[in-house]
């Protein structure tokens, strides 16, 4: 009986403490996005899917718009992004992300203020905290980069450079 009790104790210890539940965080990369107001969002990126934490209370497509402040080419199509945002802001989750590895919080705030003033933008910008979210798409682009996910958070498309507004609008309408 003592032998049986001793074996059960060892089995419980080794099976109960194997750490299998921790592989989720180690297997899939996590990224933190922070906005001007300090709101943080966690993004877990699978191969062609994402998970957003805290989970949004709506089932909407998601658009990430990466913008580099040092890139003059990036601002040529910003009025199209602003118009798409105005038209679809109730139908999609829109995350414009300032992607600059050297940017700290103070630089981020000043860059956001300048962008909003110069271009009349009225959406909230985010920035990557820690590891750069843009690099998860294997891009180190000097142009703007847009990623669109459908309502089930599966990848619809990646768009680099100046993308025709109609092309984005078509994919947005198909995702809604």
Image (cartoon, grey):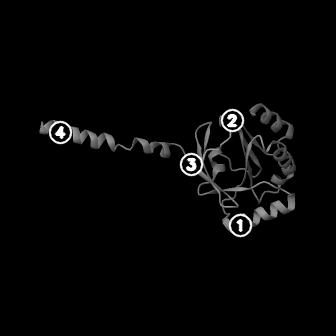
Across and down, in percent, residue 92 comes to: 75, 41
Gap between marks 4 and 2 measured at Cα: 52 Å
**Residue lying at the far top of the rendered structure:** 174
Across and down, in percent, residue 149 comes to: 69, 38
- Which element is circle 3 on? strand
Query: Which mark is first along the chain, 4 or 1?
Result: 4
Question: Foreground mark, 1 or 4?
Answer: 4
Question: Foreground mark, 3 or 2?
Answer: 2
Compare residues 118 and 39 and report the one nearer the observer.
Answer: 39
Quadrant holding the C terminus = top right
The residue at which mark 2 appears reads as: 151
Query: Which mark is first along the chain, 2 or 4?
Result: 4
Which residue does the image show at 86% across and 58% down from the upper left?
A: 119
Query: Which mark is first along the chain, 3 or 4?
Result: 4
The residue at which mark 1 appears reads as: 107
The residue at which mark 3 appears reads as: 30
Gap between marks 1 and 4 measured at Cα: 62 Å
How many C-alpha atoms fall within 10 Å of the one at disc 4: few (<14), some, or many (≥20)? few
Quadrant holding the N terminus = top left
Left/right placement of residue 56 relative to residue 143 reads left
Count of numbered labels shown in the rendering:
4
Query: Which mark is first along the chain, 2 or 3?
Result: 3
How many C-alpha atoms fall within 10 Å of the one at disc 3: few (<14), some, or many (≥20)? some
The residue at which mark 4 appears reads as: 5
Which residue does the image show at 78% across and 57% down from the upper left?
A: 71
Which residue does the image show at 69% across and 68% down from the upper left?
A: 106
- Which element is circle 1 on? helix
């Amino acid at each position: 009986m003592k032998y049986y009790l001793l074996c059960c104790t060892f089995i419980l210890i080794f099976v109960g403490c194997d750490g299998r539940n921790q592989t989720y965080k180690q297997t899939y990369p996590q990224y933190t996005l922070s906005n001007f107001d300090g709101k943080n969002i966690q993004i877990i990126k699978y191969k062609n899917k994402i998970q957003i934490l805290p989970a949004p209370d709506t089932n909407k497509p998601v658009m990430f718009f990466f913008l580099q402040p040092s890139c003059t080419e990036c601002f040529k199509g910003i009025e199209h992004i602003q118009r798409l945002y105005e038209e679809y802001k109730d139908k999609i989750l829109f995350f414009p992300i300032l992607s600059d590895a050297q940017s700290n919080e103070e630089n981020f705030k000043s860059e956001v203020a300048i962008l909003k003033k110069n271009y009349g933008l009225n959406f909230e910008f985010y920035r990557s905290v820690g590891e750069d979210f843009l690099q998860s798409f294997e891009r180190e682009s000097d142009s703007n980069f847009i990623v669109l996910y459908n309502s089930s958070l599966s990848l619809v498309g990646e768009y680099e450079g100046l993308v025709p507004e109609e092309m984005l609008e078509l994919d947005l309408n198909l995702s809604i």
